[in-house]
């Protein structure tokens, strides 16, 4: 394997764990849109992380990164739940292979080649037709049950709402206090509107980090808008992501050649609801 491929796989893993630098993460995200091979590597890396997480085959630091960053995505949470269910079903319905005398077979190798690790997506295509039919029926039940549960969970008990809030760079002008946000009850989405002193870029990037510097969310290719005779860069954050504490919204401009230029920082504090 080429060194560049090894380095690419390492960076993809760091990206999924949230430990890749913002600059390299931005470059990787652009590559994912243009290069299908890199995107396929990303899918493989996701499978590997999920498999290692379930099997407990990762360091405590990586496990914490999976829980706090990788599984922040609802889709990956569903993927993890599905993988666990599938592995449990396969384990319960697969008979152990008889012991053979060939030492290579006992060690899981053939012709001196190491066994290829199988991730949960490989279990979707078993070679045994009878088992495949049984598995397909189980997957239908799992899918139907999952859709029913998701619909029940996604039914809002009260109307959802978007709450817009103006943020200015640096400290507040009236007294030097950090902007404090008391997010109203039943708010589904918070919409920060970042004051823009000089609108000189075609698009912008906004990243919200907590007091420890951990990224909460990144919005890319944002467009400036006019609101109440001022230029702003709006973006949206799920209210559930904003726990009580201090945060910073970092605004950057995206140049035509893909460079990211840091502009302003917007500190704010989320109060207890």
Image (cartoon, rainbow, N blue to C red):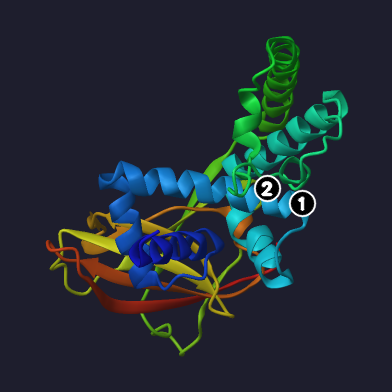
- Tag 2 near tag 1, CB within 8 Å: yes
Secondary element under disc 1, as helix, strand or loop, is: helix
Q: Where is residue 121 drawn, in percent x and y?
A: 60, 33
Residue 249 is tagged as none
The residue shown at (25%, 46%) is: 34
Mark 2–mark 1 distance (CA, rounded to whole Å): 6 Å
Instruction: Tell me the crowding category of disc 2: few under 14, some 14 to 19, or many 20 or more residues within 10 angstroms, Cα based.
Output: many
Instruction: Tell me the crowding category of disc 1: few under 14, some 14 to 19, or many 20 or more residues within 10 angstroms, Cα based.
Output: few
Image quarter (top left, top right, bottom left or bottom right) of the N terminus:
bottom left
Look at mark 1 in the image and give the residue it sits on: 55
Residue 26 against residue 153 in the figure, above or below:
below
The residue shown at (70%, 63%) is: 58
Using the rendered view, name the quadrant where residue 60 is placed. bottom right
In this picture, residue 68 sits left or right of residue 259: right
Using the rendered view, name the quadrant where residue 84 is placed. top right
Image quarter (top left, top right, bottom left or bottom right) of the C terminus:
bottom right
In this picture, residue 259 sits left or right of residue 149: left
Look at mark 2 in the image and give the residue it sits on: 51
The residue shown at (67%, 24%) is: 151
Q: Which of 73 and 229 is in front in this view?
A: 73
Secondary element under disc 2, as helix, strand or loop, is: helix
The answer to whether residue 206 is visible is no
């Amino acid at each position: 394997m080429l060194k560049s491929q090894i380095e690419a796989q390492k960076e993809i893993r760091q990206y999924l764990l949230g430990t890749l630098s913002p600059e390299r993460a931005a470059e990787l995200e652009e590559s994912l849109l243009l290069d299908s091979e890199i995107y396929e590597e990303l899918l493989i890396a996701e499978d590997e992380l999920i498999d290692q997480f379930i099997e407990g085959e990762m360091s405590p630091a990586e496990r914490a990164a999976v829980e706090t960053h990788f599984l922040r995505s609802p889709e990956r949470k569903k993927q993890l739940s599905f993988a666990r269910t599938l592995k449990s079903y396969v384990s319960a319905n697969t008979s152990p292979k008889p012991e053979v005398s060939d030492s290579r077979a006992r060690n899981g190798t053939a012709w001196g080649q190491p066994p290829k690790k199988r991730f949960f997506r490989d279990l979707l295509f078993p070679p045994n037709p009878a088992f495949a039919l049984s598995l397909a029926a189980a997957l239908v039940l799992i899918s139907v049950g999952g859709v029913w549960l998701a619909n029940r969970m996604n039914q809002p008990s009260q109307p959802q709402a978007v709450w817009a809030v103006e943020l200015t760079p640096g400290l507040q002008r009236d007294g030097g206090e950090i902007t404090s946000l008391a997010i109203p009850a039943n708010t589904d989405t918070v919409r920060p509107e970042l004051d823009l002193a000089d609108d000189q870029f075609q698009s912008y990037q906004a990243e919200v980090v907590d007091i420890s510097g951990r990224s909460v969310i990144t919005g890319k290719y944002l467009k400036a808008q006019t609101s109440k005779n001022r230029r702003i860069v709006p973006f949206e954050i799920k209210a559930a992501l904003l726990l009580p504490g201090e945060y910073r919204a970092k605004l950057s401009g995206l140049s035509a050649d893909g460079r990211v230029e840091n502009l302003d920082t917007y500190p704010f504090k989320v109060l207890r609801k």
